[in-house]
Image (tube, rainbow, N blue to C red):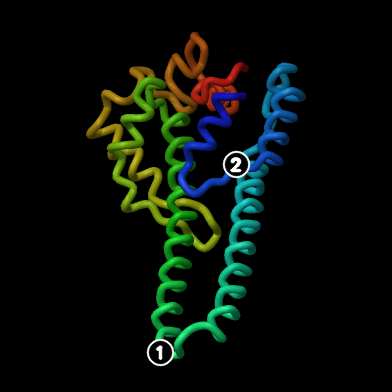
Amino acid sequence: MDKLIELLTGIEGFELTDELKGKIKNVWDNGVKSGKENLFTQEEVNKLIDKRFAREAKLHEQEITDLKEQMKGMVDPDKVQEYETKIQELETQATENKANIKKEYELKLAAVNNGVRKEAIDDFLKIADTSALEIGEDGNVTGMDELMENMKENKGYLFAEDATPGGGEEFKGGGGGGGDDMAATKRAMGLPE
């Protein structure tokens, strides 16, 4: 559990509150430690992320509204435009940060599911060219298949020799063939199965 919290803490722009830590501990104690599989579906994870972003966006919007109201009486009218431009820049930056977090999450998931060796994931993330990745209006990341094909072709040494979907041998715990995506993801994150 500590490794998961450490991983989440390392995501830029992501705030890990005590409440969220408590929920993770509860899931850990009631699911992972008890041996239950498939604690969350991808849809559930996406909903959790979307709720978190919505909550942050709402707080951010309220803060901006409050600041605009406070500015009206305090700021020289000539400076209002300058401050509004700065606010717009900050809003754009917040949107870009959200997109980058989503891309990073999806890239990590794709790396595990496409057989990137466990010890090569950090290198993979550093050298992967994510400039072609886009987030559609539906919230899904596009361009991931092309990126993965390019990485397999040009940086094949990062992938397990048996790069089957769901990860290489180190993600499956031995044996060949298929593999459970949730189990592979847990192993990639260093979580017990």
6 left or right of 164 in image: right
Neighbour tally class for label 2: few under 14, some 14-19, many 20 plus, Cα within 10 Å: some
Q: Looking at the image, is 74 positioned above or below residue 34?
A: below
User: For the residues marked 1 and 2, what is the alpha-carbon distance in whole angstroms?
Assistant: 39 Å
Name the residue carrying label 2.
Answer: 16
The residue that appears at 35% across and 36% down in the rendered structure is 125
- The quadrant the N terminus occupies is top right
Q: Looking at the image, is 33 positioned above or below residue 94?
A: above
77 left or right of 62 in image: left
The answer to whether the residues at label 1 and label 2 have Cβ atoms under 8 Å apart is no
Q: Secondary structure at mark 2?
A: loop
Q: Amino acid at mark 2?
A: Leu
Q: Secondary structure at mark 1?
A: helix
- Disc ID at residue 176: none
The residue that appears at 41% across and 69% down in the rendered structure is 89
Q: Amino acid at mark 1?
A: Asp
The residue that appears at 64% across and 44% down in the rendered structure is 43
**Between disc 1 and disc 2, whose residue precedes?**
2
Q: How far across and down, in percent of the image, does residue 133 sit?
A: 38, 52
Q: How far across and down, in percent of the image, does residue 170 sit?
A: 45, 15
- Disc ID at residue 78: 1
Residue 90, quarter of picture: bottom left
- Check the image and name the residue furthest to the left: 154
Residue 3, quarter of picture: top right
Q: Looking at the image, is 80 positioned above or below residue 50?
A: below
Between 90 and 68, which is closer to the camera in this rendering?
Answer: 68
Q: How far across and down, in percent of the image, does residue 13 sit?
A: 49, 49
Q: How far across and down, in percent of the image, does residue 118 sit?
A: 41, 21
Neighbour tally class for label 1: few under 14, some 14-19, many 20 plus, Cα within 10 Å: few
